Image (tube, coloured by chain):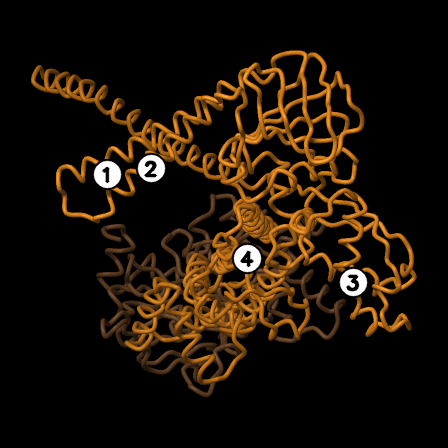
Chain colours: A brown, B orange
């Protein structure tokens, strides 16, 4: 099925420096809405750095400098007038190692809506929490123990909790930085299932080391190498018919 | 192939050879560790044990229950029972009358003075306060409880003089009346004492002769010295001669004087101080300090006070009167409540730690209220919000250095700035608290920063990722996780401030304060002292009774510190979250 999808995120000539050492060089890319885009590439190629540009998490790193234009729905991300807090409510993030807050499961999911004022009453908050946990596929397992600490869950459950936490603030984009690398294959499969369900409503960008995962989960794939965006296109063609030699070498397993 | 086989065998042999050595080194190291722990434990036990042993006697006190006649003429001179009138009453007179009633035979002026020294005159204001609190007591007989003097307290605890009691077998008969009494014992009970006393006298004479000889030798040899050496030698020889004559007791009687142990015969509720012993060991002569009832006794004893009267500050009749009061059930040993309910006093028997305790509490309160919020806030800013510049590096270095500054320097600061420039009240808990909080701040900041650093960055990232601001991240997520470490750090800092003396000495909290500060806002500006300073002041006291009290105050301070640390452990356990 060839849907003409809208472009959610437009990136033009973005350069990122860590203390004047270039980490990303002239990256330009269009990320489509309501689909999964995978970033692949060897370690240190800049995929995570690029991901962090999208929700301005690079601001928290000392010595990081971002140049260029990143727009989400036409709004410039790096505009100094834009409050990163507001941005991060629109662009959620899931990290490599599950990091639930050391609070109860309920409070983990409810924290975002609370600070952003998304619920007018306790009942509304309950509804938001339940919906988020359902969408993350965790509700059936935890509905009877919402007051237990989030850290008492297994690794896979924690990662789903973190996804529920990200969803609870109703973002438009979800960034995932190698979300399954710390999980076992069964938990990984569940998360991939979840990602597939989520893409109907959210724009998802997933950084992954596993090409098989990228092939399973994404519609479009971008290959990064040494800070440059080497190739970007539909997932199938990247894997079966790569245009660039470097892409071919990586995909064939000759390095990485 | 054989090469690798042999080389692997030799590797194996080498490893095994070293193995025994490594295990030996390991067990040696373990031994050192255990030895170190044992040694510290022993030192601790020794320290605590010696303090406890010394301080235990201060927790009990001998108290005298005296029935006093609160005659209106003495107590209420104006006659209208008003407080002003009561404050003009002569309460020391009331106490003296009660004592005279107990020992009516005491007439001599000097003896009376000695009698009234069995309690401190500071008890008169206490009696006055009792009457003011309850005016209905006027013209009544009131049982007034007061501690006996610190020396008598030490005596009854066996800490003042060397004494022993020889129970007598056989009978005793008395003859004579008034000031001189002749005693006759059935058994030669005085015999051993005679020999001991003669030996004592001869030994003293020997010592004097030796000194005289020394001076004479100097004179002979012609050493440049005083011209009076020969005279002094002669005097010493004369004294020695007199002592030998005394010991000889050529007239059959050995005279006893103040340079010799006191012998007191206790019989029939009375006490007779011996002035002469006959050489046969059966008879003696003495003066009655307390009149015995009767003339023939089969149940009597001889008290020997080895410390001679000349070398002690308490006289024989004082000891006898005290023993009599004990026998009459008027003097009993009880728990020393004064230690806890009274503030400092010039008299050890009435002195307590209440003033210092309240002073410490008020000072600690101020220190805590100043150093904890400021310290934690400064650490949060430096760790979470400030950008790393040269300026922040400088601040960090300075904070680390300030933590090592000797505490007395903060006292100087308090003196120079807070007292001289700002005019804060000297010797007040408010000022003490401010000075101590300056001293505690660097420690607080360093401990808080360490606790904040220990929170993993993933928590902060998670919070920021969800859209929390920096402040929200710190206060909702980082601070609760760092709380146990911050708590521990603050209580350790406060416990250190509790024991600090030097800076407080400089700002004047070393004066003698006789009232406890009130535990409210006004108490913050009243002159006060703190526990460590009180211990130092008591240590400096002249009377022997202060020794045990100093140790007791140290014990109380240690209990306070242990309490603080126990609180720290409890709070830490409670707030620790598993993550």
x, y percentage for residue A246? Answer: 23, 61
x, y percentage for residue B440? Answer: 45, 65
Q: Circle 4 — which element?
A: helix
Of marks 3 and 1, which one's residue comes earlier in the chain? 3
For the residues bearing labels 3 and 1, Cβ distance under 8 angstroms: no
Q: Mark 3: few, some, or many residues within 10 Å (few <14, many ≥20)?
A: many
Residue designated by label 1: B215
Q: Circle 2 — which element?
A: helix
x, y percentage for residue B11? Answer: 14, 21
Of marks 4 and 1, which one's residue comes earlier in the chain? 1
**Residue farthest along the left direction in this orientation:** B3
Is residue B116 rendered to the left or right of residue B367? right
For the residues bearing labels 2 and 4, Cβ distance under 8 angstroms: no
Gap in Å between the C-alphas at discs 2 and 3? 54 Å
Residue designated by label 2: B236
Identify the disc placed on residue A204: none
Query: Which residue is located at x 78 percent, y 62 percent?
Result: B128
How many labels, in total? Answer: 4
Q: Nearer the viewer, residue B94 or A130?
A: B94
Residue B352 vertical position relative to residue B207 in the rendered view, above or below: below
Of marks 2 and 1, which one's residue comes earlier in the chain? 1
Gap in Å between the C-alphas at discs 2 and 4? 51 Å
Of marks 2 and 3, which one's residue comes earlier in the chain? 3
Identify the disc placed on residue B128: 3
């Amino acid at each position: 099925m060839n849907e003409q999808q809208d472009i959610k995120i437009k990136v033009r000539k973005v350069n990122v420096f860590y203390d004047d050492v270039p980490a990303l060089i002239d990256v330009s890319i269009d990320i489509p809405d309501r689909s999964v885009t995978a970033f692949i590439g060897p370690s240190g190629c800049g995929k995570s750095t690029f991901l962090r540009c999208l929700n301005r998490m690079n601001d928290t790193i000392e010595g990081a400098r971002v140049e260029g234009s990143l727009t989400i729905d036409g709004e410039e991300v790096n505009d100094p007038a834009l409050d990163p807090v507001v941005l991060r409510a629109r662009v959620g993030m899931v990290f490599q190692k599950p990091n639930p807050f050391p609070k109860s499961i309920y409070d983990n999911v409810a924290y975002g809506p609370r600070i952003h004022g998304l619920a007018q009453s306790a009942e509304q908050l309950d509804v938001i929490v339940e919906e988020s946990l359902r969408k993350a596929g965790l509700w059936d397992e935890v509905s009877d123990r919402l007051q237990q600490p989030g850290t008492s869950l297994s690794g896979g459950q924690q990662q789903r909790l973190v996804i529920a936490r990200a969803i609870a603030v109703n973002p438009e984009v979800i960034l995932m930085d190698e979300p399954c690398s710390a999980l076992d294959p069964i938990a990984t499969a569940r998360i991939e299932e979840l990602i597939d369900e989520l893409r109907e409503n959210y724009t998802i960008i997933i950084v992954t080391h596993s090409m098989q995962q990228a092939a399973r989960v994404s519609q479009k794939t971008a290959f990064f190498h040494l800070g440059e965006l080497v190739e970007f296109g539909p997932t199938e063609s990247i894997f079966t018919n790569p245009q660039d030699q470097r892409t071919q070498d990586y995909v064939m397993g000759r390095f990485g | 192939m054989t090469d690798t086989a042999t080389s692997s065998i030799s590797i194996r042999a080498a490893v095994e050879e070293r193995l025994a050595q490594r295990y030996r080194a390991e067990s040696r190291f373990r031994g050192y560790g255990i030895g170190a722990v044992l040694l510290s434990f022993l030192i601790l036990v020794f320290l605590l044990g010696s303090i406890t042993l010394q301080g235990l006697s201060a927790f009990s006190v001998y108290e005298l229950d005296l029935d006093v006649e609160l005659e209106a003429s003495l107590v209420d001179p104006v006659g209208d029972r008003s407080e002003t009138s009561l404050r003009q009453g002569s309460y020391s007179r009331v106490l003296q009358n009660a004592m005279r009633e107990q020992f009516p035979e005491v007439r001599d002026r000097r003896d009376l003075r000695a009698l009234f020294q069995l309690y401190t005159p500071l008890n008169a204001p206490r009696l006055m306060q009792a009457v003011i609190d309850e005016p209905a007591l006027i013209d009544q007989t009131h049982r007034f409880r007061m501690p006996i003097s610190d020396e008598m307290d030490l005596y009854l605890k066996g800490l003042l003089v060397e004494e022993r009691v020889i129970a007598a077998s056989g009978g005793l008969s008395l003859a004579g009346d008034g000031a001189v009494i002749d005693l006759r014992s059935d058994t030669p009970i005085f015999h051993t004492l005679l020999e001991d006393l003669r030996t004592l006298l001869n030994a003293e004479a020997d010592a004097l002769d030796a000194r005289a000889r020394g001076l004479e030798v100097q004179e002979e040899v012609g050493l440049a010295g005083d011209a009076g050496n020969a005279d002094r030698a002669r005097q010493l020889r004369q004294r020695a001669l007199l002592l030998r004559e005394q010991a000889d007791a050529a007239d059959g009687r050995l005279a006893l004087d103040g340079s010799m142990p006191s012998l007191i015969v206790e019989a029939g509720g009375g006490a007779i101080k011996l002035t002469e012993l006959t050489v046969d060991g059966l008879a003696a002569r003495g003066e009655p300090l307390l009149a015995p009832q009767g003339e023939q006794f089969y149940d009597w004893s001889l008290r020997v006070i080895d410390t001679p009267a000349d070398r002690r500050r308490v006289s024989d009749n004082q000891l006898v009167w005290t023993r009599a009061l004990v026998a009459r059930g008027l003097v009993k040993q009880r728990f020393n409540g004064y230690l806890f309910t009274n503030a400092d006093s010039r008299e050890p028997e009435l002195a307590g730690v209440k003033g210092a305790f309240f002073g410490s509490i008020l000072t600690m309160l101020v220190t805590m209220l100043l150093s904890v919020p400021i310290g934690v806030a400064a650490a949060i800013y430096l760790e979470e919000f400030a950008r790393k510049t040269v300026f922040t590096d400088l601040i960090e270095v300075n904070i680390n250095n300030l933590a090592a500054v000797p505490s007395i320097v903060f006292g100087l600061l308090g003196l120079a700035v807070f007292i001289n420039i700002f005019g804060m009240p000297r010797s007040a808990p408010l000022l003490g608290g401010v000075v101590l909080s300056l001293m505690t701040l660097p420690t607080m900041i360093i401990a808080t920063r360490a606790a904040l650093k220990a929170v993993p960055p993933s928590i902060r990232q998670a919070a920021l990722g969800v859209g929390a601001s920096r402040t929200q991240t710190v206060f909702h997520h980082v601070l609760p996780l760092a709380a146990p470490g911050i708590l521990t750090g603050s209580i350790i800092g406060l416990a250190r401030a509790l024991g600090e003396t030097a800076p407080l000495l400089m700002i004047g909290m070393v004066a003698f304060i006789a009232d406890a500060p009130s535990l409210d806002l006004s108490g913050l500006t009243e002159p006060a002292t703190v526990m460590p300073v009180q211990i130092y002041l008591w240590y400096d006291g002249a009377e022997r009774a202060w020794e045990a009290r100093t140790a007791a105050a140290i014990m109380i301070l240690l209990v306070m510190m242990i309490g603080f640390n126990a609180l720290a452990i409890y709070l830490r356990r409670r707030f620790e979250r598993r993550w």
